[in-house]
Amino acid sequence: MIKVFIDGASAGNPGNVGIGYLIYKDNNVIKKNGIYLGIQTNNFAEYMAFIFALTEALGMNERNVEVFSDSKLLCEQLNGNFKVKNKNIYPLFVLAKTIISKFEKFSITHIDREKNADADKLATEAVGFLVQ
C-alpha cells in the first residue's frame, strides 16, 4: 500500500496554478513532483494533482493506494458524496474515476491543510510563490 499526498495551488482563481504530490512507500518518499500548469482554476489544479500522482503510481506498478488531500470538494466528489456541477471539471472527474478503477484498493481522505504542508509547498513552488 502506498500513500499519496496531493495539492493544487492557484495565484488567483482563475490564475497561475501548480500541482504538488508525494508518494510514500514504507514511510519513505519514493517520488515527489511539482508542476506548473498555466492559468486555470484551483479545482482544476486539485484534479490534475490527483491525475498526475495516480498516473505516476500506476506507472510504478502500484495497485493499492491511499490518497490524502486538503480539497474537501475533490474528496467528496470522488467518494460520490457531492455532484460535479462544473462542466469544465466534469471531464477531469471522469478521467479520475477511470484511473481509480485501475487500482485494486483505493481510498481518498480529506485532511487538514497543516497535514498537507509538503504537497502544498511543491504546488506553490511550481507556481513561483510561497504561501507564508
Image (cartoon, grey):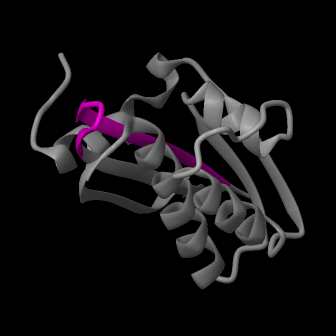
Which contiguous range is marked in magenta? 3-16
Measured as percent of width and height from the top left, residue 20 is found at 37, 49
Extreme-left residue of the structure:
128
Q: Main secondary structure of the magenta part?
A: strand
Q: Quadrant of the C terminus?
A: top left
User: Looking at the image, is 10 positioned above or below residue 87?
Assistant: above
Residue 62 visible in image: yes
Measured as percent of width and height from the top left, residue 30 is found at 48, 64
Measured as percent of width and height from the top left, residue 66 is found at 73, 49
Question: Is residue 13 a member of the stretch shown in magenta?
Answer: yes
Question: Is residue 121 a member of the stretch shown in magenta?
Answer: no
Extreme-front residue of the structure:
87
User: Looking at the image, is 39 positioned above or below residue 118?
Assistant: below
User: Looking at the image, is 85 positioned above or below residue 107?
Assistant: above
User: Is 9 in front, or is 83?
Assistant: 83
Measured as percent of width and height from the top left, residue 84 is found at 70, 41
Residue 14, by quadrant, is: top left
Residue 73, by quadrant, is: top right
Residue drawn at x 67%, y 28% is 110
Residue drawn at x 44%, y 41% is 7
* Image mark count: 0
User: Is 48 in front, or is 111?
Assistant: 48
Residue 64, by quadrant, is: bottom right
Residue 27 visible in image: no
Q: Quadrant of the N terminus?
A: bottom right
